[in-house]
Amino acid sequence: MKRERTWINYYLQSTSGIVGAVLVLIMITLSLISAFSLAPHDPLEQNPMDALQGPSGTYWFGTDQFGRDIFSRSIDGMRRSLSVALLSVGLATLFGVTLGVVGGYLGRWIDNIVVRASDVIFAFPAILLALAIVNSLGNSWIDTSIAIAIVYTPIFIRVARGPVLSVKEMDYIKSARVLGYSSPRILGRHILPNVFAPVVVQVALSLSWAILTESGLSFLGLGTQPPDASLGLMVSEAQALAAFAWWSLAFPSIFITIVVIGLNLVGDGLRDALDPARRSTS
Amino acid sequence: MRSLISLQGLSIKTSSDGRSLTSDVNISLIEGEALGIVGESGSGKTLTALSILGLLPRGVEVASGEISFNGENLLSIDPERLREIRGKEISMVYQDPMTALNPVMTVGNQLLEVLDCHNHDVKDPESHVKQSLIEVGIPDPDRALKSYPHEFSGGMRQRVVIAMSLLLSPKLLIADEPTTALDVTIQRQILSLVSKQRSRRQMSMLWITHDLGVVANLVDRVAVMYAGRIVEVGTTKQIFNSPQHPYTQGLLASLPVASSHRKNRLASIPGVPPKPWLVGQSCSFADRCQFAQKSCRERLPLLDTRGTKSVACFYPIASSI
């Protein structure tokens, strides 16, 4: 008798999924190190004597023009980026999935309102809309998260609503009704699990977009404000220095790249692991 | 004998513009009896079945008539009670086995869900569910319970669907063309499986199909529907041996016969069925009928609801051959 396999077993079969998970875990660990103030240096401490030094035993990633340790600042920026990404995607998932599932299942005018509202948000370029919202809300990381959440909610509405629309017309939902299941049971036990897989994948992918958006906002001078560290802000500040201090630009950029690639790989791995029909081929 | 379910004068209309989809449908089934409803697409056979369970699609409603099941009026029943009846006392099997099972739930969980939903008091649900799979002829039920629907073939899935609908031993099984999507050999197997289960459980059955050949050995009586009305009803033997309505006869004549010569083309009925709401007070088949007379277009032939054999035709074909 074969042991029953869960989706985790399937996930662990995919090399790229494992690589992605490892990359993300490394970044989370680094963020935690920063969160508990265990970084080798204070990310805000200025050391003018040590300004613009290359990578060394003391300053692993070198220093910036104020002599701040780029490694400490990078992991602090990673912490901030991940916090913003988690909060914003969490909010977007909560509201988007609720609205999408309710709209899709109930249909009629409720669905109409949900779809029109998300179309309006979709009509704006994401970064522009986020800029406008941050501008009116403020610059704290929570404001940034709310702005990104608003921008990404329509995506989750669509991701959740689509499967609900197709699934609720399936014979197995009709027969669930024939078998006398109640509406909450049909929605919770039979429709939601069909929405689960695409939503989880979307969460993983959106986390990476949210990190990019946060970096973009900080790069443009909104979002995180100096002297606080943010990956996007560090890239922005390093632009002028890149010609003679490559490390100031390279390391924050590499961090962004690693976490985005990691989250994308995790998303792909989850997509394959969560779909029973895809598993049999692997 | 008291009937288990009876539909009386059932008319179904669209709610928006009142187009009539079925009119004056009378069906009654005694316990253990099987009735086949035969008709073309759009003849209203599926709507009739769905109305029994109160599951008519949005925008379609029962305009008049009565549906009583075991003495309860299903049209005015408390929704909670109707939900209880569904699955437990009346069950339904759908046409397409490929979409009739939830792809993200194991077969075992889907079967257990039925028991769970109806708070069924079974000592050992696992073995009850396993037994149900054995009854429908699924090899290796232990493995089947842990499998997902995509791991089964169409025929196997339809067996699972049947096991699911029989799980709570319903008194009435409604089957909406459950063999249409299957190939002929599997179709045979499913038909004999259903037949066996029906006689073992003394279950009534409403078998909806467009294929007269399917019901020939399966049901006790046949009702032929055309453009929203029942045009002829009788025992299976009567319908097959001496069809009286020209439409029934046309249907029978269009069945392929294995021994017939190649050069004989399959008989067909000229024309297409009219929209049920456009028929009005005349015989709906008149325009396609070779025996139609003037009176066929002026009055509506009615079914005599008293006897077992009845035909809605002014000029029925002589019953003796």
Image (cartoon, rainbow, N blue to C red):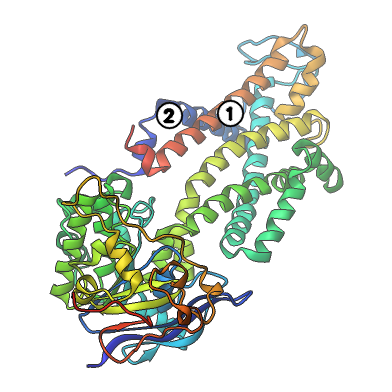
The reply to whether residue B283 is in sight is yes
Q: Chain of mark 2?
A: A
Residue hosting label 2: A18
Give the quadrant of the C terminus of chain B: bottom left
Please, what is the three-letter code of the amino acid marked with disc 2? Ile
Give the quadrant of the N terminus of chain B: bottom left
Please, what is the three-letter code of the amino acid marked with disc 1? Val
Q: Is B48 drawn above or below residue B146 in the view shown?
A: below
Please give the name of the residue rendered at 48% of the width and 68% of the height, measured from the top-left corner. Answer: A184
Badge 1 marks a residue whose secondary structure is helix
Badge 2 marks a residue whose secondary structure is helix
The reply to whether residue B171 is in sight is no
Q: Chain of mark 1?
A: A
Q: Is B32 drawn above or below residue A188 in the view shown?
A: below
| Residue under disc 1 on the same chain as residue under disc 2 | yes
The one nearer the camera, B298 or A259, is B298
Q: Is residue A253 left or right of residue A190?
A: right
Measured as percent of width and height from the top left, residue A125 is found at 77, 37
CA–CA distance in space, label 1 to label 2: 14 Å
Measured as percent of width and height from the top left, residue B145 is found at 24, 54
Q: Is residue B197 left or right of residue B316?
A: left
The one nearer the camera, B163 or A246, is B163
Q: Which mark is residue A259?
A: 1
The one nearer the camera, A110 or B286, is B286
Q: Which mark is residue A48?
A: none
Q: Earlier in the sequence, mark 1 or mark 2?
A: 2
